[in-house]
Every structure is written in C-alpha cells, then in structure tokens.
Image (cartoon, rainbow, N blue to C red):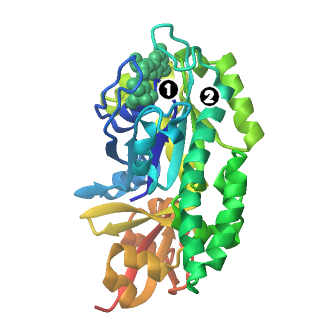
Amino acid sequence: MGFSCGLVGLPNAGKSTLFNALTAGHAEVAGYPFTTIAPHVGVVPVPDPRLDALARGVGPERVTPTTLEFVDIAGLVKGASQGAGLGNQFLGHIREVDLIAHVVRCFQDGEVAHVEGEPAPARDMTLVNVELALADLETVRRSVARLEKAVRAGEPGREGLALCHRLAEGLERGVPARALVGPEAQAGLRELHLLTGRPMLYVANVGEADLTGPGPLLQEAQAQARDEGTSLVAIAAKLEAELATLPAPERQEYLEVAGLKESGLHQLVRLGYDLLGLVTFFTLTGKKEVRAWTVPRGTRAAQAGGRVHSDFERGFIKAEVIAWEAFLRAGSEHAAREEGAMRLEGREYEVHDGDVIHFRFHA
Ligand SMILES: Nc1nc2c(ncn2[C@@H]2O[C@H](COP(=O)(O)OP(=O)(O)OP(=O)(O)O)[C@@H](O)[C@H]2O)c(=O)[nH]1
Ligand SMILES: [Mg+2]
C-alpha cells in the first residue's frame, strides 16, 4: 500500500464530500453536523501517469497500481478532547494512519451550518489543532503515569518519561508533537501513536470560484498554513465528488473546464508521497503484469525485492534497473537489455523513484 490518510476537521467542513471525491465512494453527506458517525474506510488505486505509460508500452494482461487508504471520521468540535460532540471517540480510528489531512471549510454556503456560526479558516484551523493537541496531552499523561510506576519499580522507562514530559509541556501550549521532537526521538514518538505526531497537510475545501482566483477564505487559510510551515492543497470537494462517478476522460475534461490540471486525488498523492518520503518502482512480469510498488526513500534493492516476494530478498543476486523513460525509449525489456541500457545493481543499491526493476534471484 502507498499510505493511509485520515481526514479530520470541523463538522460540515466537507470531509465526507472529500472522501467521496477521492474514493468515488458513497459516504453519507448532509448539511447538518455529525452526519458521519461510524468511520468510513476507502481504498483507492494511486493514479500514476508513469504506470499508464508503461502499460501502453508493454500491453500487459494486468496493470496493478499501488493503493491508498482514506479514513473519514466524525467532525471535531471545541471541547472534543473533553468529550464534546462525537469526534473524540473516533480519533482512535486515525491513530494508526500515516498522514493526517486536515479539512478546512473555505466555501460559503448559507444552507450549510457552521458550528461556530460562520467559516473563519484561521480560527477553525487553530480550533481543530488545539483539540488534537489536547487529545494527545491525555495520551501522554496516561503514559507518564504508567512510566513513573515502571521507573519506581526499577524497570526501564526513564528515556520515555523524559520524552513524555517534554511533549506534555509543549502540547499544553497547543504545539503539535511533530514540532517538539527531533529525529533522535522519532521512534519513541511513534510508539505513543499521537495524532499530532503524524505529518499533516491542510485540504482547503473551496468553492468553484476559488479555482480560478483564490477568494478571501482560501487566502486566509493559505496565510495561516504558510505561517505554520504546513502544506496546503485547495480542492473543490463538492465539484470533484460530483465528477468522481464519471468515466476518466470525461472527468478530466470537466476538471480542465473548471480550471484544474489535475484532480484533488493527484494533488494529495504527490504531496503525500513527498511529505512521507515515499518513492515508486515498477516491475514487469513479461506480458502478464505491469505493477507499481511504494517504498520509503532510501530502500535498498534487496529490501525492495522482499516487498515483491520474500525469495527475491533471501536469494537476491542482482537487480537489473532502468529508469521508466529509458525503458519506454528502448521499447521492451529485451531491447533495453540488448542495448545495455539496463544496469546491474547490487543489494545495497538505493531504489530511485521511477525505476523499473527486474530482480535476479536463486530460489
Ligand atoms: N457549497 C458547497 N457545499 C459543500 C462543499 N463541500 C461540502 N459541502 C456541503 O456541506 C455539507 C457537509 O458536508 P459533509 O461532507 O457531510 O461534511 P463533514 O465534514 O463530513 O461533516 P460531519 O460528518 O458532520 O463531520 C453537505 O451539505 C455538503 O454538500 C463545497 O465545496 N461547496
Ligand atoms: Mg462526514
């Protein structure tokens, strides 16, 4: 799988609408808060023009993209960490995701209620961030209590305790955990499963007019994101949800008419891979299958082989590697090999984004 992504935000921010746009699914959408009660989980293929090009070049029986998982939960409100609304009890469903997409309402619509009266992106973003930090503070305090007991009993836990104290002090001020610890404590941080310990991006849910020129609400959200140093993508969720059920070529045409070069899903995928440090490599099985795989940047050839088949790692001999464009220029695996365009790489070779890899192994 590529990665999993949890959607958070105020009620009526458009999370379920975005979920439907991304998954072409059918989460229930309505103009009253707390429409979503049980979480929705959707798995979608990762759109990748390189995989499409390889498939056109090879003409295989099967094309297998990697996948993404989206989790849509109930909206969060002020006081959620103290049990207000429904959001808090569902935060558990997104503790395991790789990436948090924080949906911010940047569309105007008098028919759609707002829990704070009117949309005000900067305030709304802070409100949700504070609730996430407070929910994490609860988690950290529970860990502190547990670790103090362990340390008193002479068990290990001193390091974890020091980390928790540092986190608690920052979270109390509303600072997200991801901004509180350096690379040295990432492993300890992951063990705590904190919501603000995950990478986060903002999805500004905009009206159609914002696609041609950002209106005041989108501008406010952009300014706030810039101040925080957080990435933001603008997506017209309602429009894209309506288009999601159309066949791909027609959908693309409508997107272009609306002033968009690529769909919200494309944008999220690119940013998500970038934020999470992920790369894609491709395998070909003769004319049978062209397939995309996602691995963390820095993955070695043998490990990458292990993702495809455990024998590829155990019996790894060499990886024959060629960049996807070079492969297409050569026309086929056979031609690429004849031309000497496929490099032979050892087990420590670092897989590059866009590599086409043929693993040589002994069974
Ligand atoms: N005008 C307009 N309405 C939108 C847009 N996005 C969502 N809506 C409407 O806003 C309402 C709420 O959308 P949902 O997707 O259900 O919101 P949610 O964030 O999932 O809400 P909860 O599940 O209650 O937390 C629905 O009536 C949507 O049709 C948009 O971009 N423009
Ligand atoms: Mg919803």
Taking the spot 57% from the left edge, 44% from the top edge, the residue there is 132
Amino acid type, residue under disc 2 in the picture:
Asp
Query: Where is residue 82 drawn, in percent x and y?
Result: 52, 40
Q: On screen, 324 above or below 271? A: below
Determine which residue is flagged by label 2: 124
Q: Give SS at disc 2.
A: helix
Mark 2 Cα shell of 10 Å, populated few (<14), some (14-19), many (≥20): many
Taking the spot 46% from the left edge, 54% from the top edge, the residue there is 95
Residue 301 visible in the picture: yes
**Is the C-beta separation of discs 2 and 1 under 8 Å?**
yes
Position of 184 compared to 247: left or right?
right
Amino acid type, residue under disc 1 in the picture:
Ala
Which numbered tag is attached to residue 13? 1
Position of 8 compared to 128: left or right?
left
Image quadrant assignment for residue 358: bottom left
Residue 18 visible in the picture: no
Query: Where is residue 182 drawn, in percent x and y?
Result: 72, 65
Taking the spot 39% from the left edge, 49% from the top edge, the residue there is 93
Dot 2 or dot 1: first in sequence order is: 1
Of residues 133 and 1, the one drawn nearer to the viewer in this rendering:
133
Of residues 360 and 199, the one drawn nearer to the viewer in this rendering:
199
Q: Quadrant of ligand 1?
A: top left
Quadrant (top left/top right/bottom left/bottom right) for the N terminus? bottom left
